[in-house]
Amino acid sequence: MKKSNLLVLILLSIVTLGNYAPIWYLRRREAFNALRTRERLGGVGPTILLLVSIGFLVYSFGFGEAVQHTHFYLGRRIELAATLFNLVIWPIVLLWYGIGVKRILDEHLRATGNDRVRLSGLGVFFFNFLYLQYKINRIITTSEANASMT
């Protein structure tokens, strides 16, 4: 696990049109799985989210108008699928991964006796990976402070 600047993460989320969340999970997956916990984090969900999202972005910015002119109903179905994906599937998968990381971190904190940092399910629900990174930064800061005291 490593510290990251939350402002940079917010800016990356904006620049990538919200696609940084699955990238964050994929980049930190090995670190989470290296912790001595029973729970493991897979990479399929974030990878699928990225691929489908990139596909919809390419459609929207490249081919959407052409499809609408030639195949109106197909274009409408693709737009409906994109809306369903963005409003239902995307949040569910990210919440699923966020809860998984919360469980991993909770178990790790119990195993290491670090009771100063607590994770909130509501924080994961509302802020997802940004909240998790904030807590990871706190865990690292607390560990560094404890190490310097001994």
Image (tube, helix red, strand yellow):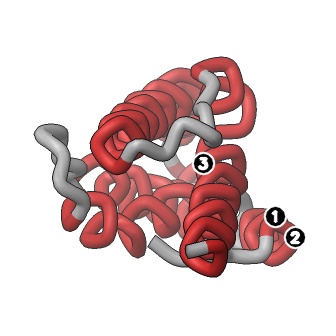
Query: Tags 3 and 1 in contact by the CB under 8 Å rule?
Result: no
Occupied quadrant, residue 145: bottom right
Identify the residue shown where x is 40% and y is 43%: 113
Q: Residue 73 carries which label?
A: none
Q: Circle 3 is placed at which residue position?
A: 132
Q: Is residue 65 visible?
A: no
**Does residue 19 appear left or right of residue 8 in this picture?**
left
Near mark 2 (Cα within 10 A), the count class, few <14, some 14-19 or many ≥20, is few
Instruction: Estimate the spatial distance between the alpha carbons at disc 1 and disc 2, rounded to whole Å.
Output: 5 Å
Identified by mark 1, the residue type is Ile
Query: Which quadrant of the rendered structure holds the C terminus?
Result: bottom right
Near mark 3 (Cα within 10 A), the count class, few <14, some 14-19 or many ≥20, is many
Q: Circle 2 is placed at which residue position?
A: 7
Q: Of residues 133 and 67, which is closer to you in this image?
A: 133
Query: Tags 2 and 3 in contact by the CB under 8 Å rule?
Result: no
Pinpoint residue 126: horizontal percent, then vertical percent. 73, 28
Vertical side of 143 occupied by 83: above or below: above
- Of all residues, the one furthest to the front in this rendering is 150
Vertical side of 111 occupied by 67: above or below: below
Q: Circle 1 is placed at which residue position?
A: 10
Identified by mark 3, the residue type is Leu
Q: Is mark 1 on a helix, strand or loop?
A: helix
Instruction: Estimate the spatial distance between the alpha carbons at disc 3 and disc 1, rounded to whole Å.
Output: 13 Å
**Does residue 150 appear left or right of residue 4 in this picture?**
left
